Image: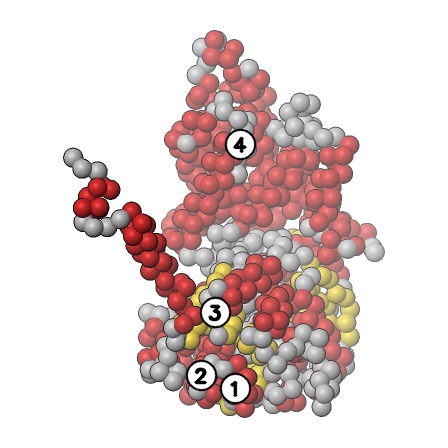
Amino acid sequence: MDLSLIIMQLFSGIALGAVLVITALGLTIVFGMLGVVNFAHGALFMIGAYAGLYLASLTGSFWWGLLLAPVLVGAFGMLIEFVLVRRLYGRSIDDPLLLTFGLSYILVEGVRIVFGSDGIPFPTPSQLIGVVDLGVGFFPKYRLFVIALVAVVLLALWLMLEKTRIGLIVRAGARDPQIMRVLGVDIGKVWLAIFGLGVGLAALGGVLAGPMRSVNPEMGTLVLAEAFVVTVIGGLGSIVGAVVAGLMVGICISMVALFAPEMATIVMFALMAAVLLVRPQGLFGLKGRA
Amino acid sequence: MPSYETKLQRAGISRRTAVMGMSAGIATLAMPRLGRAADDTIRIGFPTPLTGPFAAEARDQVKCAELAVKLVNDKGGIAGRKVELLVRDDKLNAGEAATRTLELIEKDKVHAIVGALSSAVQLAVNEVTRARGVIYVSISQSDTINEVKDFSKYTFHEALNPHMTTAAVARQTIKKGMKVAHLAADYAYGHEMLRGFKRAQAAIGAESVGEILHPFGAADYSTFMPRLMSLRPDVLCISNFGRDQANAIKQAVDFGIKQQMKIVVPVILHNQRLAVGPDVFEGVVGGANYYWGLETQNKTAAEFNKAYRAANGGAIPTDYGAYGYSGVGSLLQAMQAAGGTDTDKVVAALEGLQYDLTKGPQHYRKCDHQSVQSVLVLESKKKSAMANDNDLFAIVASDPGADEMLRSCGELGHAT
């Protein structure tokens, strides 16, 4: 087994991990701040891919789809929060879980009715077709772009949460919403924005995945499972956890694919089991939350 | 105001008769179900994965199966009896398929089963029909279903089998001395196709440089690509089905694999070609049971396309859809010949049947009930060469049906 192959495999793993990170992130933010387990996350990922495809064909450019789809689907997420999820705050964790679970079925069925259950082609943007010579082998341009974009999104998110006043309110609101209300912050608006952000990230993941995978109504099902595994490994509600676990899972799958390809999917669950045995709250999770 | 009960009594109806009358009423409502077994409709059970990654192919199968039933009913049915198709979603799950099949046999009293799209699922359906002595016409590719272990006199295999498709594709694409790499789905279909390709390439004199088995239903295949490229093969055989095919080919193309080697698949799927577009599939070669473009050279294909277009608003039938038509169609022809649904007579009629429903002559070989039929080899056209949206493939080869395409009855374990 030569070194260049292992390096190439590492790149594949990071690119795979980047997609996992972006989808797990939305799931973990919504859980961490709102305590809502969003089972519609996978369906919203799929809606994001369809929205991206639709907007790209409408404007004639992939980039408008990439920019607008997360915003529009995020706004749709805010509508979901406002009309449905909001009513269930303060109740047990299963109520919003069941609600979003049902919602995912409606969304998938809705897309089937409008776009049909066959897959739809989502061409790679012309600027990103082809491969780049990394010195050790060739790697798709588009996947490198995905790695870079996810890095930028992570940086922006981190800056927003750690360095801005909004970030301060969000973090405080997650700790103690009661005190925030007393201080005169409209915590309902914060939650609305957070839910929108989480859904927007799901949609971004969907648009990014579009040119790599076939776009179809069921594409979110597998992604939801992957996002949950990543979130659980990283620790429910932990953003750092989602990033570390996402990359870890991606690289792990990739390395296992090299030696025992048929085990490539199972390894993700084995990793989860191993982490849970040692740290039941996940790598970066807070005790008492899991 | 008198109560309801006294009103009834005045009318001379006791409570007891009222209760009896009511239960009779309920029984009448339930009648269509209970009485089913007694009416003379011919019922054909059709389990197929309407949900899941093979849904597109499954829906086409249903449309074509319904067309076959409609055409027979339009001509007055079979021996004056109407035919009814009972479609059930097997959810691409062997357990679900076995349960639905059992229900179709026990509760709906079907006279025969046609269907199932996944190789693993069809073997589960076959278990059930074999145990109950019900005819099963399988329309999904399998080699093992014809082998003695899984075979029964009630089992008929209308689909091509991996041995036939891989041999035909290999003949067109693999030359002596070439290096061949394999990416195959890790379940019955992938294993059988892999076995078929390896057998074919050994006969040609090509060398196998590596095999990768991937998990069934994976969304991302990128992690297999660096390894496949490092093997430096001349041909890459990708043996998987449905969306797995679309995703695997798409990601292989992203990695620039097509510049290095030829991509070959055992079965090239109409719907998956549509799902990822012409640029990705350009130049990919694969086998097929049917392609609508056959209509220019084959009269039966033209007639089949015409009937399908008329029933489906001008749409064209697809490869796996055509199986639905020929599977149900051949069964109905045999029932016609047998004059009814008596299982032994229909089995005998199927064994003696010469039929031509979609693409030329076919018959079921007596020892293993495999349908002997032509195999197409198709090459995906590039966008600029397409005359219209449906002009997807060029027909590279059309090998006419012959017993020599199949493994011998002795090799399959049948008495010769």
Local SS, label 1: helix
Question: Which three-letter amino acid code belongs to the residue tagged 3?
Answer: Lys
**Residue flagged by tag 2: what amino acid is it?**
Gly
Residue B340's disc number: 2
Q: Position of residue B43 (x, y in %)?
A: 44, 72
Label 2 environment density (alpha carbons within 10 Å; few <14, some 14–19, many ≥20):
some
Q: Compare marks 1 and 2 and give the one earlier in the sequence.
A: 2
Q: Nearer the viewer, residue B76 or B157?
A: B76
Q: Front-most of A231 and B100? A: B100
Residue positioned 65% across, 38% down in the render: A230
Which residue is labeled 1 in the image?
B345
Sequence-first disc among 3 and 2: 3
Q: Amino acid at mark 4?
A: Asp
Disc 1 residue type (three-letter): Lys
Position of residue A160 measured from the top left corner of the image (x, y, whole percent) = 55, 24
Name the residue that disc number 4 marks.
Answer: A94
Identify which residue is drawn at 39% across, 76% down. B40
**Chain containing mark 3:** B
Disc 4 and disc 1 in contact, CB within 8 angstroms:
no
**Alpha carbon of mark 3 to alpha carbon of mark 2: how far?**
15 Å
Where is mark 3, residue-wise? B109
Residue B292 left/right relative to B131: left
